[in-house]
Each structure stands twice: as C-alpha cells, then as structure tokens.
C-alpha cells in the first residue's frame, strides 16, 4: 500500500483481532445459504445506493482521511464508501469468508485505498480516536449487543468526527398491500428473529447513539415509494431468495408458488404497494 494511503495506527493494531464465533462467521447459515446471503447483500447495496449516498455527503465523508466500515460483509457497500471518501477505508468483519468475498469484490480498483481486518465489532482492535468517520450498513441488527458496538464505534472516532449507521431496518413498520396473512408476517420480522437478528433495530438507533455520547440526528433514508415496475425488477432479482426464505420458514412448495402468482398478478395490475422503513443515525462526537 502506498505511503500516502497508509491507515497508520489502524493497520498497526490490526493484529489485535478477536476470533469470530461460528455464529458470527456464517450468520447462522449453511454454505449454500451463505452464498445466497452474499447475493442478497449485493442486491441490497445496489438498491440502497440512492439512500446511502446523500448520507455520505451529509456526514462529510469526502473530507474523511481515515474511515472505518464496520460489518463490511462482501464489500459491495465498502466500494461506495471508498468512492465517497477522500482517504483510506478499513473494512472490518468478524467472518474471514466474508472478507475473502470483499477482497475479490473490491479488486484492483479499490485495493490501494482499502485495508481489510478480521475483528468483532464489540471489541474493535483500534486505539481511541483514530478514525475521522466510522460507518456501518445493515449491521447493528445482527449484533449481540448493539449498544456496546455503537460505543466502540464512538470510541475509535476522533473528537469532531462522525459515526454513521446508514440503513437499519424496522420490520414493524413494513407495509405490503394487498395484504397476505400467510406470508407478510414472515417478511415483517419472523425470519430475521429466527436468525437471531433484531427486526425492530431501526427505532432504537437514537437511544444507542445518544447513550454513546454522540450529538445525534435520526431519520428514515428511504422516503420514496417505489413504482410497480421497480418492485417488479426487485422481485425478479430476488425471486430465488424469497422462495428459499419462505420454504425455510415452513411454507410448502405449492404455497410458495401460489404466493408468487399473487405477487405477479398484483404487479401486472399495477396495484401493489410496498414500504419498508430503514432508519439512519448520524452522530457527531
């Protein structure tokens, strides 16, 4: 890595890593499920760009020389963080296999301005105040103690720096019409809860950030209702993911096929409405 892109203390302390547990490493997924999960991460990164980029600008990421991307996963969002920032981005994830995916995804284009570290977000291996900005995306919902993680994010941020959670969902506010009493509860949080995630993490962000000592602003990043055609494209990209999720949550193949037909008919008629609130929190130290 060139000297002018050296993350300095961040990289020097990278050896103080914590061994991830199997649950952290695979998000409680089999290898086949893990590959589907990576595919889903890439789709989410693509579909959430229009919500995340204004937050990067609002947080002043362009002027940040040292940025930590916590829970970087497959690297799809990390690439955007690199493009939005002015310096080096350190990507952290507890799962080595995720970092392997991230290394391949970031490739040569972003390699000179990225450093990937295996670590647990509850115990970050960095000194106090080393980063100008610390960001995460769709990460806190999967942590065992999100309050502790946000405190760690604040700890490694310098005075005057920013902590940004770009998108954390709240499945309690998920709306779908026409309603489907068989399937909607699964997508409104049952599947996430069974995986060990918090389906209502979005509404808690202000509390986590304020209790971490941050001057905090919260909001909903995705205020626009997608058109039926946008919903259709998203549905087609995620069809296999949805099908496997419903099967894993107890639906029969016939029930899943019937649900798909209903979805297609609603979109063909142009009457379907979907809204899924995803909160952001911007904290200044």
Image (spheres, rainbow, N blue to C red):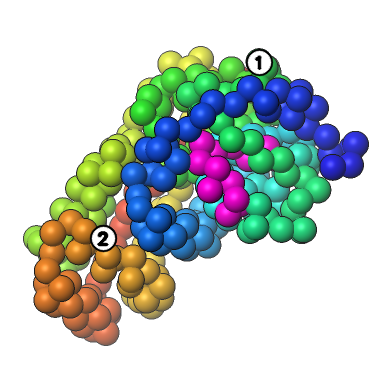
Q: Is residue 69 left or right of residue 82?
A: left
Q: CA distance from mark 2 to mark 1?
A: 41 Å
In the rendered image, residue 138, in percent from the top left (x then y), is placed at 44, 44
Mark 2 sits on what residue? Answer: 245
Q: In the image, what residue occupies the spot 56% across and 31% down?
A: 119
Where 227 falls versus 33 (above or below)?
below
Q: Is residue 246 left or right of residue 155?
A: left
Residues drawn in magenta: 89-102
Residue 31 appears in the rendering: yes
User: Of the numbered discs in the image, which one, if any, rests on residue 262?
Assistant: none
Of 23 and 138, which appears nearest the observer? 23
Q: Residues within 10 Å of mark 1 (few under 14, many from 20)?
A: some
Residue 172 appears in the rendering: no
In the rendered image, the residue lying farthest to the right is 3
Where 155 falls versus 119 (above or below)?
above
Q: In the image, what residue occupies the spot 90% across and 36% down?
A: 3
Where 151 falls versus 139 (above or below)?
above
In the rendered image, residue 91, in percent from the top left (x then y), is placed at 63, 40
Mark 1 sits on what residue? Answer: 128
Q: In the image, what residue occupies the spot 31% across and 39% down?
A: 197
Q: Is residue 98 magenta?
A: yes
Instruction: Mark 2 vs mark 1: give the one in front.
Output: 2
**Tag count:** 2
**What secondary structure is marked by label 2?**
helix
Upstream in sequence: badge 2 or badge 1 = 1
């Amino acid at each position: 890595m060139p000297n002018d892109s050296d993350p300095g203390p961040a990289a020097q302390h990278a050896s103080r890593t914590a061994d991830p547990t199997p649950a952290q490493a695979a998000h409680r997924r089999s290898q086949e499920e893990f590959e589907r999960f990576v595919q889903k991460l890439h789709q989410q990164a693509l579909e959430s760009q229009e919500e995340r980029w204004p937050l990067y600008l609002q947080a002043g990421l362009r002027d940040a020389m040292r940025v930590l991307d916590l829970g970087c996963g497959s690297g799809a969002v990390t690439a955007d963080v690199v493009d939005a920032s002015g310096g080096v981005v350190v990507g952290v994830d507890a799962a080595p296999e995720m970092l392997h995916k991230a290394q391949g995804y970031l490739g040569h284009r972003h390699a000179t301005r990225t450093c990937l570290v295996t670590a647990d977000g509850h115990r970050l291996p960095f000194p106090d105040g080393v980063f100008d900005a610390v960001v995460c995306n769709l990460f806190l919902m999967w942590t065992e103690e999100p309050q502790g993680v946000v405190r760690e994010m604040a700890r490694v941020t310098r005075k005057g720096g920013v902590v940004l959670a770009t998108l954390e969902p709240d499945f309690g506010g998920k709306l779908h019409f026409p309603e489907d009493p068989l399937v909607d509860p699964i997508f409104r949080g049952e599947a996430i809860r069974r995986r060990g995630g918090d389906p209502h993490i979005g509404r808690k962000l202000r509390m986590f950030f304020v209790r971490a000592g941050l001057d905090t602003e919260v909001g909903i990043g995705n205020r626009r209702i997608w058109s039926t055609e946008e919903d259709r494209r998203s549905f087609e990209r995620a069809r296999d993911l949805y099908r496997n999720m419903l099967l894993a949550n107890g639906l029969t193949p016939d029930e899943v096929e019937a649900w798909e037909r209903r979805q297609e008919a609603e979109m063909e008629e142009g009457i379907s409405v979907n809204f899924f609130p995803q909160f952001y929190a911007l904290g200044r130290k």
